[in-house]
Image (cartoon, rainbow, N blue to C red):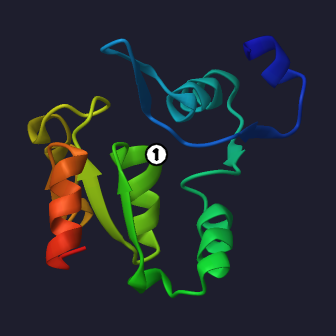
Amino acid sequence: MIECSLKTDNLIGMHGTSTYSKNGKRYPGVGAIMSMIKFAVNKDYEVVGKPSFNFYDKARDLISLDFKEITVISDDMIGDLLGAQKLNMHSCLVLSGKVRSEEEILNTLSKNEIPKNICKEMSDVLELLKKGEI
């Protein structure tokens, strides 16, 4: 990866996922790997998927809503929700594997980055939807 990155002018990441979970274990996601490559070769990179503005703007355009009317529900605080929040979207973090407890993530966030809703599982998200809180 390093040798290829040194030979190109443009580095592109498909998304900014911080981690992914497989068989109960967590691994570095594309975003984490791209950050490592950036540091190793001193070249910036562009993300074309989440959490890039262009990705979210295209999705917003397809559903004809303003960002402030959208809630993004995800298990990836860094790769999904922080980018959405920067665009004034609402966020809901689901503790489903990438982040297993609030303590793992809350102390890494500033006060304005903490999502309005944190749910232990998707059934909790459904309850919030039924109540009209999301």
Q: Residue at x 59, y 76 (%)?
A: 60
Q: Nearer the viewer, residue 103 or 45?
A: 103
Residue 75 to residue 98: above or below: below
Residue 105 position, x and y percent, is: 20, 41
Would you identify the image quadrant in which residue 107 lies? top left
Residue 83 to residue 41: above or below: below
Q: Is residue 15 visible?
A: yes
Q: Is residue 111 visible?
A: no
Residue 40 position, x and y percent, is: 63, 21
Please count the marks in the image.
Answer: 1
Give the residue at the far left of this rendering. Answer: 103
Q: Residue at x 40, y 84 (%)?
A: 68
Say what amino acid the circle numbered 1 marks.
Answer: Gly
- Going by the image, does 29 lie left or right of 95? right
Residue 125 position, x and y percent, is: 22, 57
Q: Nearer the viewer, residue 118 or 47?
A: 118
* Residue position for label 1: 79
Residue 68 to residue 111: above or below: below
Would you identify the image quadrant in which residue 26 lies? top left
Residue 100 position, x and y percent, is: 19, 31
Would you identify the image quadrant in which residue 58 lies? bottom right
Q: Could you tell me which secondary element the residue under label 1 belongs to?
A: helix
The local crowd at label 1, few if under 14, some if 14 to 19, many if 20 or more residues have their Cα within 10 Å, is many
Quadrant the N terminus occupies? top right
